[in-house]
């Protein structure tokens, strides 16, 4: 479901589940975590690029698997484990000592936003869009929230988290989420240009700079990510979550409790 390659100090991790819009299963998240760990342990690694195949960068969590969790007799424990694995993945990406780039070739939704927000650079094609539709499914984007606030501030984050509206890459660039927007056919060329620029820097200086940025952050993002695991797990176990997921899969409007 993923591919991981390295060439000339540049690592690439590719989401390769296009038939499911690169939706994240527990297994896929574990594969990503192992790939990031392996890439990060390579002393020759200078840059890590996240990319995807198909028309969608990532549609978020696999809602079919989430519905199976909701029917499990051990649902609460499984929700917690899923949230922990996802949190660990984002933390690994966010704290990796080499620069990271998200090459966004299509829409990014829900949990897929975690990849974008955990990366240092975000380059998007013009045809993409961004959305956090979790409340429409009866759940929350709890683990994404600390990274979103870190990148764009609480005011803009509130709009994205509460409205569920689609946000264009141009608007995302205006608020500082996306660093560059290019025509679809020029994405790879722009990524190559960015990679060449990054690779002219000292590996040690880049690592020190990344850590210093984290240390200077006004909020403790890593600890906030870990604290969000409980919020995410609890939200997934509510009646509204079960109804929202069922309604989405049955292609009907949800009936929320008052």
Image (cartoon, grey):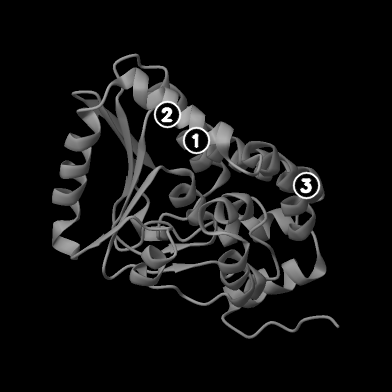
What residue does disc 1 label?
A: 213
Lower position in the chain sequence, tag 2 or tag 3? 2
Residue 84: x, y in percent? 67, 39
Which quarter of the picture shows residue 203? top left
Task: Determine whether, in the image, residue 31 is placed left or right of residue 181.
Answer: right
What is the secondary structure assignment of the residue under circle 1? Answer: helix
Total residue callouts: 3
The image's mark for residue 209 is 2
Q: CA distance from mark 2 to mark 3?
A: 31 Å
Image position of 161 (left or right of 242) = left
Percent x, y of residue 122? 35, 51
Label 2 residue SS: helix
CA separation, marks 1 and 2?
6 Å
Marks 1 & 2, CB-CB < 8 Å contact = yes
Which residue matches tag 3? 230
The answer to which image quadrant residue 155 occupies is bottom right
Quadrant where the N terminus is found in the figure: top left
Q: Position of residue 251 (x, y in %)?
A: 56, 81
Given this view, does label 2 or label 3 mark the residue nearer the observer? 2
Relative depth, front residue between 146 and 29: 146
Horizontally, residue 147 falls left or right of residue 13, namely right
Sequence-earlier tag: 3 or 1: 1
Q: Say which quadrant the C terminus sits in.
A: bottom right
- Residue at horizontal 22%, vertical 29%? 199
Q: Nearer the viewer, residue 28 or 207?
A: 207
Q: Residue at x 75, y 43 (%)?
A: 227
Nearer the viewer's eye, disc 3 or disc 1?
1
Tell me if residue 103 comes above or below residue 56 in the rendering.
Answer: above
Q: Residues within 10 Å of mark 2 (few under 14, many from 20)?
A: some
From this view, report whether residue 93 is shown above or below residue 138: above
């Amino acid at each position: 479901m993923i591919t991981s390659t390295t060439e000339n100090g540049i690592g690439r991790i590719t989401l390769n589940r296009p038939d499911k819009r690169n939706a994240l299963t527990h297994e896929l998240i574990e594969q990503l975590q192992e790939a990031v760990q392996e890439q990060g342990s390579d002393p020759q690694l200078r840059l890590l690029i996240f990319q995807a195949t198909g028309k969608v960068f990532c549609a978020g969590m696999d809602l079919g698997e989430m519905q199976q969790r909701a029917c499990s007799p051990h649902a609460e424990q499984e929700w917690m484990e899923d949230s922990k694995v996802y949190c660990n993945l984002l933390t690994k990406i966010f704290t990796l000592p080499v620069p990271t780039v998200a090459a966004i070739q299509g829409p990014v939704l829900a949990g897929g936003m975690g990849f974008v927000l955990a990366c240092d650079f975000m380059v998007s094609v013009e045809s993409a869009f961004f959305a956090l539709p979790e409340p429409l499914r009866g759940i929350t984007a709890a683990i994404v929230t600390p990274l979103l606030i870190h990148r764009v501030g609480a005011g803009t984050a509130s709009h994205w988290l509460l409205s569920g509206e689609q946000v264009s890459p141009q608007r995302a660039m205006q608020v500082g989420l996306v660093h560059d927007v290019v025509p679809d056919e020029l994405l790879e060329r722009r990524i190559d240009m960015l990679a060449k620029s990054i690779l002219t820097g000292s590996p040690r200086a880049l690592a020190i700079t990344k850590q210093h940025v984290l240390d200077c952050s006004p909020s403790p993002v890593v600890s906030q990510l870990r604290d969000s695991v409980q919020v995410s797990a609890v939200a997934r176990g509510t009646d509204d979550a079960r109804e929202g997921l069922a309604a989405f899969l049955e292609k009907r409007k949800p009936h929320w409790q008052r």
